[in-house]
Amino acid sequence: MRDVSRIEAAAVQPGRGEVLHRLGLEPADVATPRLEDLLVRSAALFARVAAPAAVFEWVTREDFATIYEGDGENAPASPLDEIFPRADALALFAVTLGSAIDQAIRDLFDRGDSALGYVLDVSASYAADRLADLTAERFLASLRRSVSGGIRRVLPYSPGYCGWHVSGQRALFESLRPDDIKVALTASCLMDPLKSVSGVFVAGRGTVHRFRPTYPFCDACTTQQCRVRLATVK
Amino acid sequence: METLNHLSRLLQEGDDSGVDALTREAIASGIPAEDILRALLAGMAVVGERFKEHEIFLPDVLLAARAMHAAMGHIKPLLIAQGVPGGTKVVIGTVSGDLHDIGKNLVGIMLQGAGFEVLDLGSDVPPERFVDTAVAAGAPVIALSALLTTTMVRMREVVDMLAQRGLRGRILTIVGGAPVTETFAREIGADAYAFDATSAAARVRALLPVA
């Protein structure tokens, strides 16, 4: 099953608090009037130029095993190695905010308005993640319509993180072919437009997603984002 | 003196139109461009310190940088005409195959705020362009950015090219970007590594002989 969707920019647009959080401000911090002005202008620009689109396609565990193997550059062991064989269902996905927002950010930096460019960039990064989450929910809804059982949770996993080498994008794109939402892959495995996210949705009971973050690459990880995700699965 | 202090304060507040107007006023009243520049750099130093201490946030720094940019538009031609030497040149760019440039832009802004003259080559820059530009401009530092593990390996090509042309030691390299680590920097023979934009200017300064 393949699902392509266009989403309203408002559905993924971060609120003031979310942008401030990504900018490093805590709720108790006071934003200056100039920063408030940037937030307002960035939000208006986002609403004008963001064009969110998403695609996902169901994939079997066997087919995903081949895709995951990719060019053979993954870490010898990784969380996804443990997780995907336990999954009830899998889907490859790609989401994008479109090329106009990339261009808008670039233009702002080019003309010296780096502050606004940066706030828009931060907002767009948040929105791309949110779009992936919304698309995961859409995948979950499609599963609940067609599969019985206790699928409670879908989480996205992407090449370039947690031992899945970024070159894995090649096999993923060859299989998913997200031309319908206009996302392409460069020779260096970079997605164009930049504000795009791709990977695999893993569906199953919450416990499917559990792993111990003690792989060799975990030491060098600067985000430790997995700990936040792990805290959300039961 | 009061004008220069005021100018520095406006810059710290990120008031670009205020800085723009006061810079023009200062020039018209005969304050030397070099003194104006000194006040602006002092203001940026305060901004940098406050950011380091988490008193202000990156957009505040960028607003101050925008104000600095507005002032430089007026005083740069005067500095050049007076033969005042510019800041030390740093060639910066995102390596070949990589189109990410936000991090690189932030580093460039931080370097400018610290008084360096930044030659920004943009993104997807081939190795020879980094080296040729540094040689032609007399820049002692090349700053390389990459956001992907597939592109960070291109940093080595720039370091190797400098070695092949006998420029190692004369032109120094600093590397950074999300997947780049201190260990990787050492492995490829880069002269320095910066974890983030904030530390980049200090790292570049530490590379250079004390004036």
Image (tube, coloured by chain):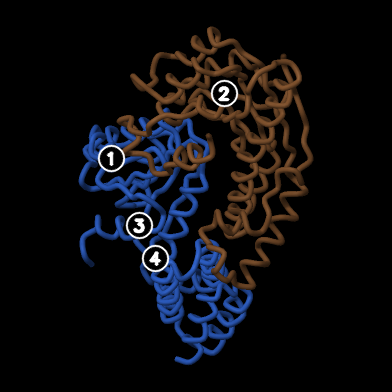
Chain colours: A brown, B blue
Q: Which mark is residue B163?
A: none
- Camera-nearest label, 2 or 3: 2
Q: Are marks 1 and 3 in contact (CB under 8 Å)?
A: no
Name the residue at 50% across, 75% down: B12
Q: Which quadrant does the N terminus of chain B fall into?
A: bottom left
Cα–Cα gap, marks 4 and 1: 24 Å
Cα–Cα gap, marks 1 and 2: 35 Å
Q: Give the residue number, with chain letter if any, for mark 1.
A: B185
Would residue A112 be visible to someone looking at this image?
no
Which quarter of the picture shows residue B115? bottom left
What's the residue type where badge 2 is placed?
A: Val
Query: Residue A188 at what x, y percent from top left?
Result: 48, 26
Neighbor class of circle 2 (other Cα within 10 Å; few <14, some 14-19, many 20+) is many
What's the residue type where badge 4 is placed?
A: Lys
- Camera-nearest label, 4 or 1: 4
Q: Chain of mark 1?
A: B
Q: Give the residue number, with chain letter if any, for mark 4.
A: B52
Q: Are marks 4 and 1 in contact (CB under 8 Å)?
A: no
Q: Answer left or right for A139 relative to A185.
A: right
Compare residues A182 and A135 and report the one nearer the observer.
A135
Q: Chain of mark 3?
A: B
Q: Which mark is residue B199?
A: 3
Name the residue at 49% across, 69% down: B56
What's the residue type where badge 3 is placed?
A: Ser
Q: Give the residue number, with chain letter if any, for mark 2.
A: A202
Query: Residue B119 at what x, y percent from top left?
Result: 44, 52
Cα–Cα gap, marks 3 and 4: 9 Å
- Camera-nearest label, 1 or 2: 2
For mark 3, give the secondary structure: helix
